[in-house]
Image (cartoon, rainbow, N blue to C red):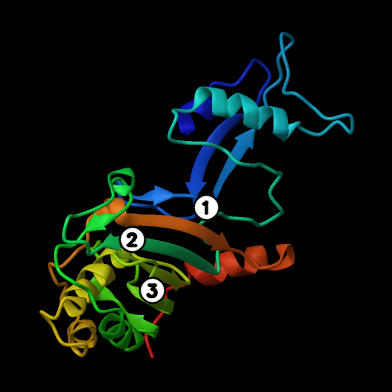
Amino acid sequence: MEEALQRQPPGASVPKSVVVAGRTDAGVHATGQVVHVDVVPLTSPSGRIPVSPEGIPDLARMTGRWNRLLPGDVRVLGARIAPEGFDARFSAIRRHYRYRVSDAPWGVDPLRRHDTLAWNRPLSTDAMNAAAAQLLGLNDFAAYCKQRDTGTTIRELQRLVWTRVDEHLLEVEVSADAFCHSMVRSLVGVLLLVGDGRRTDAWPAKVLESGIRDSAVAPAHGLTLLGVDYPPDAELAARADQTRNLRTAP
């Protein structure tokens, strides 16, 4: 993305930074990623950015140009001038993920092998949902995060629900105000051990309380970032300031 943005025609703005709403692990997919770019204007007698009749940047044409430069697995679906105070990462109030698992004895449908995890044991959605309900709310998720030297592991987990889509395909929908590194994959990995009967539905809550990270982390390829929610434009800057403040668990 940064490379495509840098390859602008003469007279185009040059990105100063590229900020994403959700920093996904390698191998994780995204259908609803949000990016913001701070730019500095350049002037050039030999070219210019496409503009609309109103004299503002023609972002529809720029989107087409970016998509011609991007690799086949990345596409810009839309662009607009960001409101004052907008930050793709810190202005967000909620992020939504989905993880797909197949518990078919023969593995995964070949057409879904790149976005679905094969689990060779039957899974109980009732058991996983009973365990998941105990993890909701504002908590310190240090036990479910890859530790870093800076930042907080306190997050508000708002939704964690498993459904069986068909005979062998399961999906879990996960929403929170923010996620720390590997948090969704760690939650999924622990709940899968409950679902196949190797752990009780009380165990994930005990892991949370311990603060000690467990080694059960689901592979990256089953995870997809679905979307990001933001407050009204007038509240974007205040939300960014609030998010940057260090939180404490109740």
The numbered mark, 3 or 2, whose residue comes first in the sequence reads: 2
Within 10 Å of the Cα at label 1, are there few (<14), some (14-19), or many (20+) other Cα atoms? Answer: some
Name which residue type carries label 3: Thr
Report, in whole angstroms, how far the alpha carbon at label 1 lies from the one at label 3.
21 Å
| Residue located 71% across and 44% down the image | 81
Q: Quadrant of residue 117?
A: bottom left
For the residues bearing labels 1 and 3, Cβ distance under 8 angstroms: no
Report, in whole angstroms, how far the alpha carbon at label 3 lies from the one at label 2.
10 Å
Label drawn at residue 184: none
Looking at the picture, how far across and down is residue 184, in whole percent?
32, 66
* Secondary element at tag 3: strand
Label drawn at residue 100: 2
Q: Nearer the viewer, mark 2 or mark 1?
A: 2
- For label 3, the residue is 163
The numbered mark, 2 or 1, whose residue comes first in the sequence reads: 1
Q: Nearer the viewer, mark 1 or mark 3?
A: 3
Report, in whole angstroms, how far the alpha carbon at label 2 lies from the one at label 1.
16 Å
Foreground pick, 107 / 197: 107
Label drawn at residue 32: 1
Above or below, 213 relative to 67: below
Say whether residue 41 is left or right of residue 157: right
Which residue reaches farthest top?
Answer: 46
The numbered mark, 1 or 3, whose residue comes first in the sequence reads: 1
Within 10 Å of the Cα at label 2, are there few (<14), some (14-19), or many (20+) other Cα atoms? Answer: many
For the residues bearing labels 3 and 2, Cβ distance under 8 angstroms: no
Say whether residue 230 is left or right of residue 214: right
| Residue located 72% across and 13% down the image | 47
Name which residue type carries label 2: Arg
